[in-house]
Amino acid sequence: MAISLGSGLGGFAAIAAQPTYGATFVTPTRVLMIKSAKSTWDPHLVYGGPYLEGGITVVPGAARVSTYLDAKGTLMGDMTNSAAALLLKVALASSASLTQLGTTSAWELGGATGANMGVADTNGSYFDMQWGVPTSDGTQKPYNFPSCVITKAEWVFDKTGLVTYSYDFDAQTVQTSTALITPTFPTNAVAFNMANAASTFKIGAFGSEAVLDGVRKATFTLERPMATDRIYLGQQLKESPITNNYINLSVTLEADFLPATKTALWDLFLANTPFSVVATAIGSVIGGGNSNTFGLNMTNVFIDSNAEPNLDGPDVIKNSLTLKGTVDAAADPALKATYIGIDTAF
């Protein structure tokens, strides 16, 4: 049972899918597994003047105007087999839904084909969010963020740590009028990791990737340049963000200079050869031979930088290679995700 605490331990964040940007706030139902939730509120202030008022040298308070209020922020946590599907779907701007695998207790985002990255402008990739923020006496106060989009996502697969996420969001506004929900926290949530022998890191031609040894950490990044300042005359709140440049996809690999990585990574930089990268974290079996699974596949990447095998002291030769995600000639999805967990709904 949750106990009211007057510290961060007493807080929570919950979300709900929002089909239409700017529509009536949807009361959140899915409580997230988060490490931190940070936001910056922007009233877009204007101070009039300077006015020439016979020697007054401080701006008058009456000249201060809040033109409109919106917010930005970041959610950070571990990827888990529960309460993670909706944010993953929104980050990808995917139209995928949760599909039951046979008659088992395993549900997969997008079914057998997984979830492909889409265009946020057309897939209605929005969510409404509430934070319960406790005062020092343990009283939770609601702060509500309507019509959020994810502008940047980062997922880290680390051999010596858990699989983590970081989502940068943009909210249409901030309000406190929606009452605090009674949160129902995820049960049996397990964080993904790369410790299971079934977890893999692979590279190669798309669809024919092979296991590669020597990579310590893989960081996948999706960044969506978006016009998030579409506020017009006669409106109180801004319009939905619009993609206004190419989506930036990248992978950063921390790798040692092994014979395998020399051939499979470093040589590809000199050859300017594209390849596919797949990181997959496998957890326990949850029914019908299906296991808790989270994986990402960037299907056509080039090594852009940091591919030099430098001699720098007596340590093992290594580098942090930067890979750029692109679209291949067959127009395959540039980023694909596999997510199998225990949630039956977002």
Image: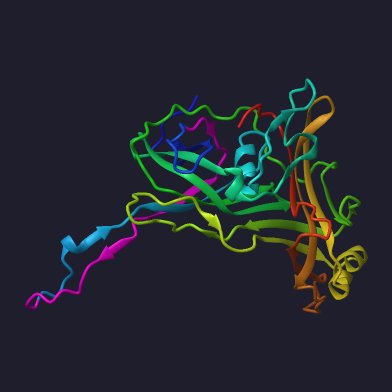
Residue depicted at x 16% and y 71%: 58
**What is the quadrant of residue 311 in the picture?**
bottom right
Q: Nearer the viewer, residue 241 or 287?
A: 241
Q: Quadrant of residue 105?
A: top right
Left or right side of 37 for 330: right
Q: In this view of the protein, which residue sits in the foreground, 143 or 242? A: 242
> x, y percentage for residue 222?
65, 56
Q: State the extent of the magenta-drawn residues as a range.
A: 28-55
Left or right of residue 36, residue 172 in this image: left
Residue at position x 54%, y 55% in the image: 242
Instruction: Determine whether, in the image, residue 33 is placed left or right of residue 146.
Output: right
Can you say whether 306 is above or below 164 in the image?
Answer: below
Farthest top residue?
103
Q: Position of residue 13 (x, y in %)?
A: 49, 39
Q: Position of residue 96 (x, y in %)?
A: 69, 38
Looking at the image, which residue is at 61% across and 44% down?
123
Left or right: 119 in relation to 312? left
Indicate whether 57 appears above or below 286: below
The stretch drawn in magenta includes residue 53: yes
Q: Is residue 145 magenta?
A: no
Residue, x 64% and y 51% (percent of image)?
A: 119
- The front one of 203 and 69 is 69
Q: Position of residue 245 (x, y in %)?
A: 60, 64
